[in-house]
Amino acid sequence: NFKNSFKSKLNLSKDSFGLIYVGRINKDKGISNLIKIYLNIRKKLKDKIFLILVGEDEIDFFKNTPSSFFEKNKIFYYKKNNNINFYLNICDLFITCSVREGFCQSIIEANTVGLPAVANNLNNLSDTIIDKKTGYLIKNHNLFIKQILSIYYDKNLYKKLSTNCIKRCKLEFNQSIFLKELRLLLFSNE
């Protein structure tokens, strides 16, 4: 109901597929490439897809682009927000075209609600995404579109990736595990 209510409010079809990027909006994060990829996918899927961007616009990307462009192409921008679960629960796939990345916490947050991720194959992202299990690490920029479309069209693949994301987060990123390890580290010398 939550997802359908949001889609209805923004005039999106109930079965539309949502892509999401959460992070800083700047050149290193590949915002221009992300938009190009999205627009190419939109040519194929028309109104069956939308894009949500959440983060601090460090390059005035949104100020310098007419709002009609975003409205026409179903791109929704929300400023930096500490509770991204609201937006993650509306979408279906996390995407980032970052060319430089540390450990991407946003991907883990997306995985906790069952969103697989597609990203550039960067060293640090291989700690965040298990290739072909919780998402895809793309070696060739041109493969982004192909991989996103394969996830969109193959419902069984999507379900498998989504399930793997949730399982991994419960096993490897569980807060109680971290607290236990932290206690052991802090109090092991006593």
Image: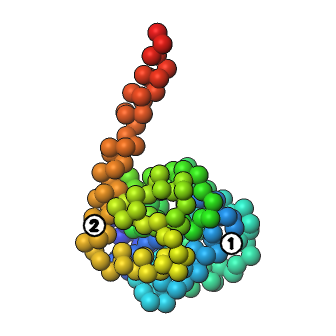
The image shows residue 171 at horizontal and vertical percentages of 32, 43
Q: Residue at x 37, y 43 (%)?
A: 172
The image shows residue 179 at horizontal and vertical percentages of 42, 29
45, above or below 32, in the image: below
> Which colour assignment does the render follow?
rainbow
Residue in the foreground of this view, choosing between 93 and 71: 93
- Rendering quarter of residue 4: bottom left
Query: For the residues marked 2 and 1, what is the alpha-carbon distance in whole angstroms?
Result: 33 Å
The crowd level at tag 1 (other Cα within 10 Å; few <14, some 14-19, many 20+) is few
Residue in the foreground of this view, choosing between 35 and 101: 101
* Residue 81 shown left or right of residue 180 in the figure: right
Kind of residue sitting beneath label 2? Lys
Q: Which residue is drawn at 40% across and 43% down?
A: 173
The residue furthest left is 156
The residue furthest top is 190
Residue 109 seen in render: no
Circle 2 SS class: helix
- The quarter of the rendered structure image containing the N terminus is bottom left
- Choose mark 2 or mark 1, whichever is in front: 2
Kind of residue sitting beneath label 1? Phe
- State the residue position of label 1: 62
- Rendering quarter of residue 188: top left
Label ID, residue 159: 2
Q: Residue at x 64, y 75 (%)?
A: 32
Label ID, residue 178: none
Q: Which of the two discs, 2 and 1, labels the residue nearer the N terminus?
A: 1
The crowd level at tag 2 (other Cα within 10 Å; few <14, some 14-19, many 20+) is some
Q: Which residue is drawn at 49% across and 70% down?
A: 138
Residue 103 seen in render: yes
Circle 1 SS class: loop
The image shows residue 45 at horizontal and vertical percentages of 42, 87
